[in-house]
Image (cartoon, grey):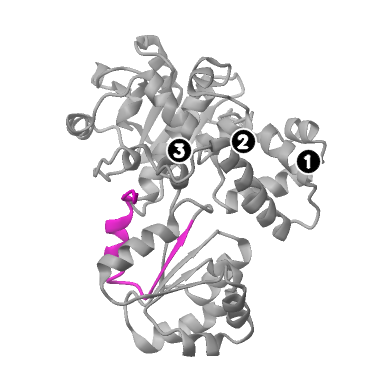
């Protein structure tokens, strides 16, 4: 069963403008499936070549000119990170053919691939990032607007969506957004994620890190997942995984490049001088977090000690995804000062700061909004604030502070 992606209209618009479109993102997130679906509707007779095929990969690496004599545009080249040698030749073909949409590329965002893209294809490539399925994609909603705290936009969205209660939301959190699981292709999430780690993550990290012990890498993943939605604690992860802190930093950097984790950096400026500098860590897929932290069911995850962290990870990842699917970069931060006062999330947009708290409660008290006063001294104007929570309906404390159900994110 194909699940429509919110990025599809953007891809087709860019296909009329750029000779090259590169979709990055974690393995199994649905990059190739989406482009194959669009190939069927495009009607240009596009040929797909997968560099997972060892023969095709060897030809691409050793004789790129011959590769393009055999495979003529329009092309879909899958797993292009295996042959960055193709990029200079793609540049030549793009510059001589002047034909938008000639090359659709997919790849995990590995360092050598991105260096090749930046050196060879600058100005010729539209670069997009596709994460695992969003809540809206799973439920079939066609609203693709990035999340913001505009009351009218949220009220309009509420008319087209159905309310999700807390157990239902935690089922989404527990099962995650990997298309093979959501579509029902695979039924056992435990076997899927175990194989995913062995087949993809460990192999990709091994290619980029000279020293890797499979058992210690799994311990590292579990220690990292246990600290989701928290400030990065390199020493804590290193101690749990029995590795040194430099290895932790290197592996986290690789996971970020592979689209597995992302970091939220603290908001600061010249006025707010007492803020911390350590980023917070999140996973793009909460299903992987639940697997790594050994929650056996949505119910145990909902009632467990990590339920608040899982909910925060879910909400932040959903907001990030809404911008990625629109081809936009979100300016998202968190706030924490040296007195341990914290704002979970801050969206910077149009010269304003929109503060948000994320809480696992259906009836949040007004006092939660007091923390928003911490950014009053910022040179940027404070915009609408919100508590993102388990409420049934969109409402407000006052004109400046909303109560937003998580199912509207």
Dot 2: element? loop
Residue 407 vertical position relative to residue 28 in the rendered view, above or below: above
**Along the polypeptide, which appears first: circle 3 or circle 2?**
2
Dot 3: element? helix
- 301 sits to left or right of 21: right
Q: CA distance from mark 3 to mark 2?
A: 21 Å
**Along the polypeptide, which appears first: circle 1 or circle 3?**
1
Where's residue 336, x and y in %? 55, 26
Where's residue 20, x and y in %? 40, 73
Specify the quadrant of the image occupied by residue 140. top left
Q: CA distance from mark 1 to mark 3?
A: 27 Å
Dot 1: element? helix
Specify the quadrant of the image occupied by residue 56. bottom right
Which residue is label 3 attached to? 317
- 326 sits to left or right of 227: left
Which residue is label 1 attached to? 216
Question: Measuring 26% from the left and 69% from the top, which residue is drawn there?
Answer: 42
Label 2: few (<14), some or many (≥20) within 10 Å? some
Which residue is label 2 attached to? 277
Q: CA distance from mark 2 to mark 1?
A: 28 Å
Residue 142 vertical position relative to residue 30 in the rendered view, above or below: above
Residue 11 vertical position relative to residue 213 in the rendered view, above or below: below
Question: Measuring 36% from the left and 50% from the top, which residue is drawn there?
Answer: 325
User: Is residue 319 something that shows in the picture?
Assistant: yes
Span colored in magenta: 1-24
Where's residue 143, x and y in %? 24, 43
């Amino acid at each position: 069963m194909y699940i429509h992606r919110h990025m599809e209209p953007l891809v087709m618009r860019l296909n009329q403008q750029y000779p090259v479109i590169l979709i990055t993102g974690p393995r199994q997130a649905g990059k190739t499936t989406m482009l194959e679906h669009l190939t069927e509707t495009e009607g240009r007779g596009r040929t797909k070549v997968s560099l997972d095929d060892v023969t095709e990969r060897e030809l691409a690496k050793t004789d790129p000119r011959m590769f393009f004599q055999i495979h003529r545009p329009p092309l879909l080249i899958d797993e292009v990170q295996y042959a960055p040698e193709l990029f200079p030749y793609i540049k030549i073909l793009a510059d001589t053919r002047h034909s938008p949409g000639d090359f659709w590329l997919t790849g995990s965002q590995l360092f050598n691939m991105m260096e090749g893209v930046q050196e060879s294809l600058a100005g010729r490539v539209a670069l997009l990032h596709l994460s695992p399925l969003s809540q809206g994609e799973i439920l079939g909603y066609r609203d693709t607007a990035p999340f913001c705290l505009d009351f009218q936009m949220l009220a309009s969205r509420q008319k087209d969506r159905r309310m999700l209660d807390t157990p239902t939301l935690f089922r989404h959190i527990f099962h995650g957004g990997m298309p093979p699981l959501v579509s029902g292709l695979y039924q056992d999430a435990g076997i899927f994620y175990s194989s995913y780690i062995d087949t993809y993550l460990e192999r990709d990290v091994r290619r980029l890190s000279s020293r890797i012990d499979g058992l210690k890498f799994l311990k590292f993943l579990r220690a990292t997942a246990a600290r989701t939605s928290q400030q990065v604690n390199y020493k804590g992860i290193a101690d749990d995984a029995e590795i040194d802190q430099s290895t932790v930093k290197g592996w986290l950097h690789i996971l970020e490049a592979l689209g597995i984790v992302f970091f939220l950096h603290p908001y600061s400026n010249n006025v707010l001088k007492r803020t911390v500098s350590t980023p917070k860590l999140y996973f793009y897929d909460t299903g992987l977090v639940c697997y790594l932290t050994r929650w056996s069911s949505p119910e145990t995850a909902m009632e467990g000690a990590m339920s608040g962290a899982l909910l925060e990870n879910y909400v932040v990842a959903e907001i990030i995804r809404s911008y990625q699917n629109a081809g936009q970069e979100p300016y998202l931060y968190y706030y924490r000062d040296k007195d341990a006062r914290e704002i979970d999330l801050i969206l910077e947009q149009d010269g304003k700061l929109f503060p948000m708290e994320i809480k696992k409660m259906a009836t949040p008290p007004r006092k939660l909004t007091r923390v928003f006063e911490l950014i009053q001294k910022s040179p940027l104007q404070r915009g609408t604030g919100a508590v993102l929570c388990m409420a049934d309906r969109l409402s407000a404390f006052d004109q400046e502070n909303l109560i937003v159900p998580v199912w509207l994110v």
